[in-house]
Amino acid sequence: MLAPVLAAAGCTTSAGPGGGAPTVTSAPATAASASAAPGGGHGWTRQRFKGAVGRRTGVTRTAKPTVLNGLVGALFTRNADGDHFCTASVIDSAGLNLIVTAAHCVWDPKLGRRSDLVFVPGYRDGDTPSGVWPLLAVTVDDAWKDHADPDVDVAFAVVQAQNGQQVQQVLGANRLGVNRGYRLPVRVTGYPGSSEVPITCSNTTSEQSPTQLRIDCPDYTGGTSGSPWVTDFDPATRTGTAVGVIGGYQEGGNSPDTSYSSYFGDRVQALYDRATG
């Protein structure tokens, strides 16, 4: 689910399959400030969240500018003036500076690492409410580098600090979840290349294969590669646990209504350990 714009950026990967909301002109609340709100943020409890997800499964809609959705951003080449081609999100790390996306978004096995990429969390209609964060270092599995192994279509990237702060200090972060099984209620949020606002959908994952997850959500067209699959919403921090990203089989899927992810198991844990070591 890589947006076609990458052809102009030197990527030869073909596009596979990936809303309106008011323009956001101010930065979203940080996870820290959200946790201080009465009731952990607008009265959302774990039970209410699960109930809401259950009523709206498999429905894609525009993602509201919430703390959870604010952890997700579009990937651009050089700056936010051009077209965005993939999605990434902030993931918890000791360095407070890590994002996760699909490996095919940042590393072409034939050409190597794609340079001059920036992460723009919360991007909407040309606005960059949470800044523009250049990618400094990228970690992908050797099996992806060598032969684009779809079972490790995952990448972690360190982003550059801005104004003396790391990205996790500004926004908070989702936790990394590994070996969580195949049936999980998740929310998938990402940026179709044809849209200037993110979309989101909740559903339960299933097993595509022992090394791949599947989810059925409509309209996930090119550009949504790297979109995080988030479960275990915590109403106190208004963050969750990322158990996948759109990618893997068919580089995320050849149909906009079905998406895939490499299974987050021991190999992804090892990749994370390398990125943060």
Image (spheres, helix red, strand yellow):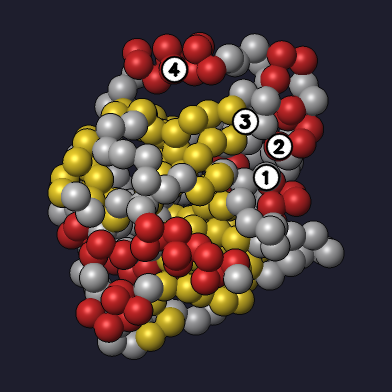
Residue appearing at x 71%, y 37% in the figure: 31
Q: Position of residue 258 (x, y in %)?
A: 20, 42
Label 3 vs 2, first from the N-terminus: 2
Question: Given the image, on which type of amino acid does mark 2 rest?
Answer: Ala
Residue appearing at x 33%, y 69% in the figure: 104
Q: Which residue is mark 3?
A: 238
Q: CA distance from mark 2 to mark 4?
A: 20 Å
Q: Is residue 137 left or right of residue 210?
A: right
Q: Which residue is mark 2?
A: 31
Asked if the residue at tag 2 contacts the one at tag 3, i.e. Cβ–Cβ closer than 8 Å, the answer is yes
Disc 1 packing (10 Å; few <14; some 14–19; many ≥20): many
Q: Which residue is mark 1?
A: 172
Question: Given the image, on which type of amino acid does mark 3 rest?
Answer: Arg
Residue appearing at x 56%, y 44% in the figure: 174
Question: Given the image, on which type of amino acid does mark 1 rest?
Answer: Gly
Look at the numbered disc 4 and give the secondary structure of its residue. helix
Look at the numbered disc 1 and give the secondary structure of its residue. loop
- The picture quadrant where one finds residue 276 is bottom right
Question: Given the image, on which type of amino acid does mark 4 rest?
Answer: Lys
Q: CA distance from mark 4 to mark 1?
A: 22 Å
Q: CA distance from mark 2 to mark 1?
A: 5 Å
Q: Position of residue 173 (x, y in %)?
A: 62, 46
Disc 4 packing (10 Å; few <14; some 14–19; many ≥20): some
- Is residue 82 visible to us here? no
